[in-house]
Image: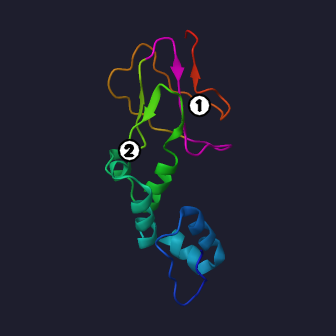
Amino acid sequence: MIPSCQESDLKIDGNLKLSELRSCALVCKHWYRCLHGDENSEVWRSLCARSLAEEALRTDILCNLPSYKAKIRAFQHAFSTNDCSRNVYIKKNGFTLHRNPIAQSTDGARTKIGFSEGRHAWEVWWEGPLGTVAVIGIATKRAPMQCQVPY
């Protein structure tokens, strides 16, 4: 339940979900300023602590981000454990993809949130042996996550 707006006394429940926080920001200018002005506020810290696994918070990726809101945003765009091929798994930190080496198979994983327009950039860190053919690609949501054809 979204709390009522009181201009003189802003109190946002620390248990609200991200979608509910967006709704709160649309309720009044005061709430918008509170939610968008301080990206390290108690609201963002609380949401970050509830939404992200401890392993994710300890990664170099999130440790280097300047605010709790930025950490939440990065985690939203991390790999989805529910949308990857059977030879791929996402480690507990949410940012590391591991592919089991299966011969003559191409495998993939999508992120939790996709894009429909705009310019986007990624930073990729390669770790360990890559096998014979390692590729990074971008695909639509309808692209198959696995193919059993020779590459």
Magenta segment includes 136 = no
Residue identifier under label 2: 93
Q: Quadrant of the C terminus?
A: top right
Q: Earlier in the sequence, mark 2 or mark 1?
A: 2
Q: State which mark lies toward you, 2 or 1.
A: 2
Residue 1, label in figure: none
Q: Is residue 52 left or right of residue 117?
A: left
Look at 47% across and 25% down and name the residue there: 87
Q: Which quadrant of the figure has residue 67?
A: bottom left
For this rendering, which residue is in front, 49 or 10?
49
Q: Is residue 36 left or right of residue 92?
A: right
- Percent coordinates x, y for residue 117 in the rendering: 68, 43
Q: Which residues are magenta?
A: 102-120
- Percent coordinates x, y for residue 32 in the rendering: 58, 74
Q: Secondary structure at mark 2?
A: loop
The answer to whether residue 87 of the structure is visible from this angle is yes
Tell me which secondary structure the magenta stretch mostly adopts.
loop
Looking at the picture, which amino acid does disc 2 mark? Asn
Q: Which quadrant of the figure has residue 24?
A: bottom right
Look at 62% across and 30% down and name the residue there: 139
Look at 68% across and 43% down and name the residue there: 116
Look at 49% across and 76% down and name the residue there: 13
Q: Quadrant of the N terminus?
A: bottom right
Crowd class of label 2 (few under 14; some 14 to 19; many from 20; radius 10 Å):
many
Residue identifier under label 1: 138
Q: CA distance from mark 2 to mark 1?
A: 22 Å
Looking at the picture, which amino acid does disc 1 mark? Ile
- Percent coordinates x, y for residue 23 in the rendering: 63, 69
